[in-house]
Image (tube, rainbow, N blue to C red):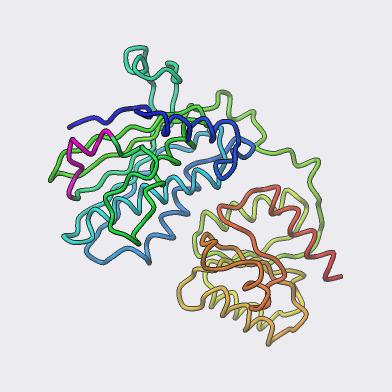
């Protein structure tokens, strides 16, 4: 396979990476924290399942639960960008997209071409497609700002250059291999945090707590489990459901058992906005927090018109969840 350059090849691309690292303008770097990328991968898989053409098969191999230092929202954006590019490359003839997450040890020989990498343990996030591949004359330019092979209206060409800057700012590297006619492989390396079992992802002591009863709804079992764990550690009583219909049935039978409902937006059978309307019909004063991964499709204003008291972006961040839950409960009292 042909390997792309592992660094920006011109001054404009280098400037983008500097802006990501320095926190300038639209490339502002958020505070880096220990995150679990496997949860982000599962969330992205959930979002892609309903939006991917039927002629494209998605395969996933999640073999790592390690922690890395990064910004959860930005890593989510990088993965979404790589996946949508892979789907775009296969939309005409179909194919298979494989997402894998593993832990690897990189030796001195491997990291030598990458000035920012050091030998040691890394998380390897790989997105492979069986699409048309990338011609060698284009491969050297794919991380350049504004470079694109898409038609007008299909994209700005900024995605990969910004993704490259985000990964570099997290202490990692992104590499691409491609053969025309045989597909492409984008690989992200992020350094694993050592002694992760002793690391507290965020200090719970400083976060607002409570003892109210919360109904947490998400059709992705692992996301619901994470939400339940966070809220329980903050002192709340939590009931989870992975089906919006089951959640509605439970609430219909026990409408006054819950002080708050937290629900996902994108779910089969009954979407989050539909569920909220049904909950409010049953009990008009029930406070609801809506969670979504699609910021362009729903805003705080549109969430309010649905009946939600607050909007949370996915993947959920412990601090944001704790503060929003406490604020909504206090305002509803």
Q: Is residue 152 magenta?
A: no
Residue 276, above or below 134: below
Q: Looking at this view, name the residue that lies furthest to the front.
A: 11
Q: Looking at this view, name the residue that lies furthest to the right.
A: 333
Q: What x and y, as percent, mark residue 13?
A: 41, 33
Residue 324, above or below 137: below
Q: Is residue 138 magenta?
A: yes
Q: Looking at this view, name the residue that lies furthest to the bottom.
A: 281
Give the mark count. 0
Would residue 90 appear left or right of 64 to someone viewing this image? Answer: left
Out of 164 and 80, give the one closest to the viewer. Answer: 164
- Residue shown at the point (76%, 50%) measured from the top left: 234
Instruction: Answer with the quarter of the image where residue 290 lies.
Output: bottom right
Q: Quadrant of the N terminus?
A: top left
Q: What x and y, as percent, mark residue 195?
A: 58, 24
Q: What x and y, as percent, mark residue 183?
A: 19, 44
Q: Looking at this view, name the residue that lies furthest to the top.
A: 108
Instruction: Answer with the quarter of the image where residue 253 lies.
Output: bottom right
Q: Which residues are magenta?
A: 132-140
Q: What x and y, as percent, mark residue 262?
A: 65, 66
Would residue 12 appear left or right of 240 to someone viewing this image? Answer: left
- Residue shown at the point (71%, 79%) measured from the top left: 254
- Residue shown at the point (64%, 56%) measured from the top left: 228
Q: Quadrant of the C terminus?
A: bottom right
Residue 123, above or below 87: above
């Amino acid at each position: 396979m042909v390997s792309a350059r592992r660094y920006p090849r011109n001054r404009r691309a280098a400037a983008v990476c500097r802006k990501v690292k320095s926190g300038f303008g639209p490339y502002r770097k958020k505070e880096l924290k220990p995150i679990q990328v496997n949860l982000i991968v599962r969330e992205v898989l959930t979002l892609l399942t309903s939006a991917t053409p039927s002629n494209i098969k998605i395969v996933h191999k999640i073999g790592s639960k390690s922690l890395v230092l990064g910004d959860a929202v930005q890593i989510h954006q990088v993965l979404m960008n790589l996946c949508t590019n892979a789907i775009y490359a296969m939309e005409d003839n179909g194919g298979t997209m494989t997402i894998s997450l593993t832990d690897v040890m990189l030796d001195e020989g491997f990291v030598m071409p990458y000035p920012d990498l050091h030998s040691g343990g890394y998380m390897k996030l790989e997105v492979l497609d069986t699409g048309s591949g990338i011609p060698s004359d284009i491969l050297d330019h794919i991380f350049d700002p504004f470079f694109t092979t898409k038609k007008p209206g299909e994209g700005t060409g900024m995605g990969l250059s910004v993704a490259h800057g985000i990964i570099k700012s997290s202490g990692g590297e992104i590499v691409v291999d491609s053969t025309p006619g045989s597909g492409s492989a984008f690989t992200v390396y992020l350094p694993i945090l050592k002694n992760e079992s002793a690391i507290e992802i965020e200090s719970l002591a400083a976060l607002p707590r409570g003892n109210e009863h919360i109904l947490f709804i998400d059709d992705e079992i692992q996301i619901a489990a994470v939400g339940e764990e966070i809220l329980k550690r903050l002192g709340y009583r939590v009931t989870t459901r992975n089906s919006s219909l089951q959640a509605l049935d439970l609430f219909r039978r026990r409408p006054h058992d819950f002080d708050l409902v937290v629900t996902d937006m994108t779910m089969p059978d009954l979407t989050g906005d539909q569920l909220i309307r049904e909950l409010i019909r049953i009990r008009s004063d029930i406070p609801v927090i809506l969670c979504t991964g699609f910021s362009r499709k729903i805003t705080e204003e549109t969430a309010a018109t649905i009946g939600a008291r607050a909007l949370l972006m996915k993947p959920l961040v412990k601090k944001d969840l704790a503060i929003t839950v406490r604020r909504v409960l206090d305002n509803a009292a």
